[in-house]
Amino acid sequence: MYKSARNNSFRHLKMSGLALAVASLMTTSMSYADNSASAYRDLSIVGAEALAAGVCDADGFCPVLSTELKNSGTVKDLVIGVSFETMLMTSTAVRSKGGNKSESVADAKIVMKVYVDGEEANPKLVTFDYRKQELWASFSGVLDCTDGNGDGIIQYEECNFDEMDYEEVGLMLDTARASTFNFLAYDIGSGSHTIEVWAQLTHSEEVVNDTSTSRASAALGNGTLSVWEVHGGSDTGTAE
């Protein structure tokens, strides 16, 4: 009886300790995150040209998500989580003959920034997706030959070396991914605050000669914006 009662008491003590630990963690979590706000974008894919048709700044950044957070009391910090699907397409093709070099370049990039009441949150600009694709080649060319006598053997004199055809190679990459980054805003006072996410979608194409082609595009898919108000500390960013 004594052993059984002692074991039961010990198990009860361990369970009580676990319950206290869980309660302590829950209390700490609740005291850390005081207030929150969120928003989401559930639309079809938006490309660079369609996005730029809206209200954009001089650098090509356009608003894509926004929310408001109201707080009171002591000065707080904000953790701002931005998540987005990003899509990049790059395509390059080169044609060459006679040992001449042909080159093609395509790149696409998506950059995000966050404003809190008109002020940029740290760390300012964040690249969500980027690709630079470069393709070059130097080919001899494709011989134009005809089996004139029908013997199944191509002789040297049956080829036209003056009119060689181009050799061509191409590469296209079309990818999608989802990325998340946490921005930080320090020492936010009480009141109503506006949080905005701005995106810059850029792409460029470059060909060295007229025998090359290149295409590129960048697009955004679904996105979410989550804001947490936390008890503030000081800005611990690296000093310049």
Image (tube, rainbow, N blue to C red):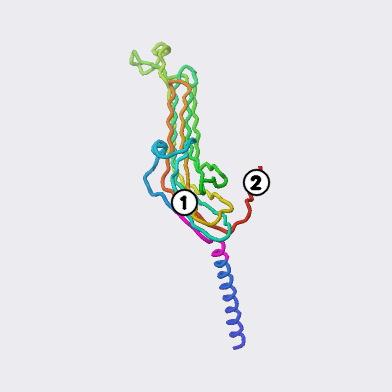
Residue 38 badge: none
Report the residue at 36% width, 45% height from top. 44
In the rendered image, which quarter contains the C terminus? top right
Asked if residue 181 is positioned above or below residue 170 in the image, the reply reads below
Is residue 30 within the magenta segment?
yes
* Mark 1 neighbour density, 10 Å: few (under 14) some (14–19) many (20 or more): many
* Mark 2 neighbour density, 10 Å: few (under 14) some (14–19) many (20 or more): few
Choose between 48 and 232: the one closer to the eye. Answer: 232
Report the residue at 45% width, 54% height from top. 38
The residue range painted magenta reads 28-38
Give residue 136's position: percent from left, percent from top: 49, 26
Looking at the rendered structure, the secondary structure element under dot 2 is: loop
Is residue 39 within the magenta segment?
no
Choose between 43 and 65: the one closer to the eye. Answer: 65
Give residue 121's position: percent from left, percent from top: 55, 47
Give residue 154's position: percent from left, percent from top: 39, 16
In the rendered image, which quarter contains the N terminus? bottom right
Q: Which residue is mark 1?
A: 225
Choose between 230 and 182: the one closer to the eye. Answer: 230
Asked if residue 168 is positioned above or below residue 154 in the image, the reply reads below
Residue 238 badge: 2
